[in-house]
Image: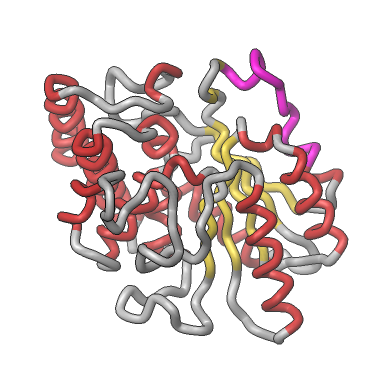
């Protein structure tokens, strides 16, 4: 796909995020919107997957370590054809397919239940090790939040991945610089993120704009071509990207838009799509 085609899909993914959290009257739009481009790139360009056969043995695996941004993952999965987009309106409803955090048992396309921060990367490392032990060719991708990497388990898993030279593993850090209580520097600074992953024997790729498809394309190609060690893509993004009043506003980490805000957000995204 061209970068332009991917950009257009990312706009639709963002619309699905807003639809879901508005219908749920709760959820996490900010970090879902910052990661909408990488979700789109992974599911429409990068990964070996088949929505008609979600469990195919040689598929690439994805683990959403920052599981609270499930609205973004669900919207990308729906856009890719894993389930009808209408399901997005049932987000977080009792008994619905799409719960507040990804559930492997309930949702086609979800490879790992996640949501307890720090644990997703450990599961991804286990999957990557399994592939190596079985001589399987699939790759494993996991998306972490920059606030999430304050969890110690992230670094235990990273130490193991580096020690075992898991070059089929790609860790992505969504560096939007905001977490639930404020900026990540104010809460517990993880900087420099790249040097920390390098210390754990990762090949690190810094992406200046993780909301830019061309830059993501270059980064994922480099990660795929890296042999002998795992890769970490550290991408700077804008929290709430694409919705005017949500961008770079920590207050939109975990709340839903009301009807008026929903209308403004959808109009923003409609205009963004028309501009492409």
Please check the rendered image and state whether residue 178 is part of the magenta-colored stretch, yes or no.
no
Give above or below for 79 relative to 12.
below
Say which quadrant the C terminus sits in.
Answer: top left
Q: Residue furthest top?
A: 186
Q: Nearer the viewer, residue 1 or 264?
A: 264
Residue depicted at 75% across the width and 29% down the height = 192
Question: Count the marks: how many?
Answer: 0
Please check the rendered image and state whether residue 191 is part of the magenta-colored stretch, yes or no.
yes
Q: Is residue 121 left or right of residue 89?
A: right
Residue depicted at 84% across the width and 48% down the height = 200
Relative image position of residue 208 (x, y in whole percent): 56, 35
**Magenta part of the protein: which range?**
183-196
Relative image position of residue 43 (x, y in whole percent): 40, 62
Relative image position of residue 98 (x, y in whole percent): 32, 53
Q: Is residue 257 left or right of residue 127?
A: left
Give above or below for 176 relative to 250.
below
Q: Which is the main secondary structure of the residues drawn in magenta?
A: helix
Q: Nearer the viewer, residue 27 or 141?
A: 27
Give above or below for 256 relative to 136.
above
Relative image position of residue 119 (x, y in whole percent): 65, 50
Q: Residue 248 falls in which quadrant of the image?
A: top left
Residue depicted at 27% across the width and 36% down the height = 21
Residue depicted at 75% across the width and 66% down the height = 166
């Amino acid at each position: 796909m061209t970068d332009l085609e991917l950009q257009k899909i990312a706009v639709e993914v963002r619309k699905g995020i807003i639809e879901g959290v508005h219908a749920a009257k709760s959820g996490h739009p900010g970090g879902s919107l910052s990661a909408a481009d990488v979700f789109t790139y992974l599911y429409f360009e990068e990964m070996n997957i088949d929505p008609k056969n979600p469990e195919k043995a040689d598929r690439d695996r994805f683990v959403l370590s920052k599981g609270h941004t499930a609205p973004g993952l669900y919207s990308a999965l729906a856009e890719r054809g894993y389930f009808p987009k209408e399901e997005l309106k049932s987000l977080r409803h009792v008994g619905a397919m799409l719960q507040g955090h990804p559930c492997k048992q309930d949702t086609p396309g979800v490879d790992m239940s996640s949501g307890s921060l720090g644990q997703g990367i450990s599961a991804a490392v286990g999957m990557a090790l399994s592939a190596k032990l079985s001589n399987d060719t699939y790759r494993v991708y996991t998306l972490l939040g920059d606030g999430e990497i304050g969890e110690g388990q992230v670094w235990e898993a990273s130490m193991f991945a580096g020690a075992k030279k898991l070059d089929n593993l790609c860790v992505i850090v969504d560096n939007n610089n905001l977490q639930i209580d404020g900026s990540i520097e104010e809460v517990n600074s993880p900087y420099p993120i790249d040097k920390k992953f390098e210390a754990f024997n990762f090949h690190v790729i810094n992406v200046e704009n993780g909301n830019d498809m061309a830059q993501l394309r270059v980064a994922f190609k480099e990660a795929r071509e890296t042999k002998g060690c795992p890769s970490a893509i550290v991408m700077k993004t804008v929290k709430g990207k694409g919705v005017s009043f949500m961008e770079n506003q920590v207050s939109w980490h975990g709340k839903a838009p009301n009807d008026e805000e929903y209308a403004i957000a959808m109009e923003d995204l409609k205009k963004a799509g028309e501009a492409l």
